[in-house]
Image (cartoon, helix red, strand yellow):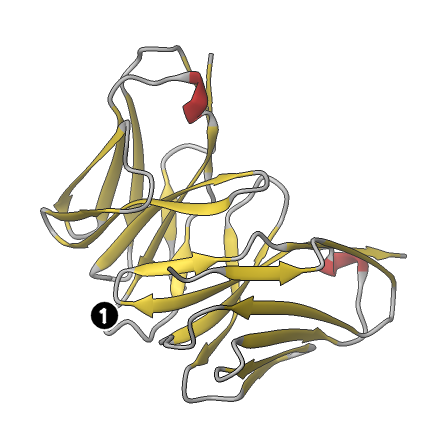
Amino acid sequence: DVKVTQSSRYLVKRTGEKVFLECVQDMDHENMFWYRQDPGLGLRLIYFSYDVKMKEKGDIPEGYSVSREKKERFSLILESASTNQTSMYLCASTQVPSVTEAFFGQGTRLTVV
Amino acid sequence: KQEVTQIPAALSVPEGENLVLNCSFTDSAIYNLQWFRQDPGKGLTSLLLIQSSQREQTSGRLNASLDKSSGRSTLYIAASQPGDSATYLCAVKTGANNLFFGTGTRLTVIP
């Protein structure tokens, strides 16, 4: 059974803290993604990675960075958390070629206070 | 840029009813379309994947259709059950590296 695992279901952090969200997939997928989901706005792409150490900005990369040192792990970093980054964060992975299914993790609900 | 729309935003039906959820997209140059289910506070669970060359896919009580030329997909749920209550999202893949999502239809099945 395929699996994408996010390290935390819920996180509460203070403004200005550096925050790490971790995602691990066990399917040997090349592509990994970070989205945030907000009411009325749907899912928006923050960053994606198509290979180890490779990354591309999505639609809303400001205030975020990512790291992919190993194929199975993709980390999202909030350099200095702000209250407007309170959101649900979702990690996903897909195989290449791009016609295959996307698999999502269970989500991390981040609250910045 | 691809835009995906789902109508209605919310739907309530009595248990046992058949129902259709709609998804439309503006750019027909897609690789595939995927339907997901999301329970409150949870991640997305994949329901059905339709490749651009296919017209429909079925899984149990679910049937998804795709009309690429008109930019539309439907998800048909037969004999709805309270356990089907969730938000249903459609997403289209237009390149190797992105999925474009609709904002979802929140379905409530009333016992």
Q: Give percent across and percent down for residue A60.
A: 33, 39
Q: Depth check: B93 or B40 in front?
A: B93
The chain holding disc 1 is: A
Identify the amino acid type marked 1: Val
The residue drawn where x is 42% and y is 77% is B28
Task: Check the image and report above or below for A51 versus A9.
Answer: below
Task: Look at the picture and state if A98 lies above or below A49.
Answer: below
Residue A76 quadrant: top left
Asked whether, in this view, residue A53 is left or right of residue B77, the answer is left
Bin the neighbour count of mark 1 within 10 Å (Cα to Cα): few under 14, some 14-19, many 20 and up: some
Q: Is residue A95 found left or right of B107 in the rendered image?
A: left
**Residue at position x 49%, y 84% from top?**
B69
Q: Residue at x 74, y 58 (%)?
A: B83
> Which quarter shows the C terminus of chain B?
bottom right
**Residue at 37 percent of width and 77 percent of height:** B29
Q: SS class of the residue under badge 1?
A: loop
Please say whether residue A100 is visible from this viewpoint: yes
| Count of marks overlaid on the render | 1
Taking the image as drawn, is residue A109 in sight? no
Residue B63 drawn above or below residue B85? below
| Residue beneath disc 1 | A96
Q: For this view, does B41 lie left or right of residue B82?
A: left
Residue A83: % across, % down: 44, 17
Q: Residue B31: horizontal and vertical position, in percent? A: 35, 76
Quadrant of the frame with the N terminus of chain B:
bottom left
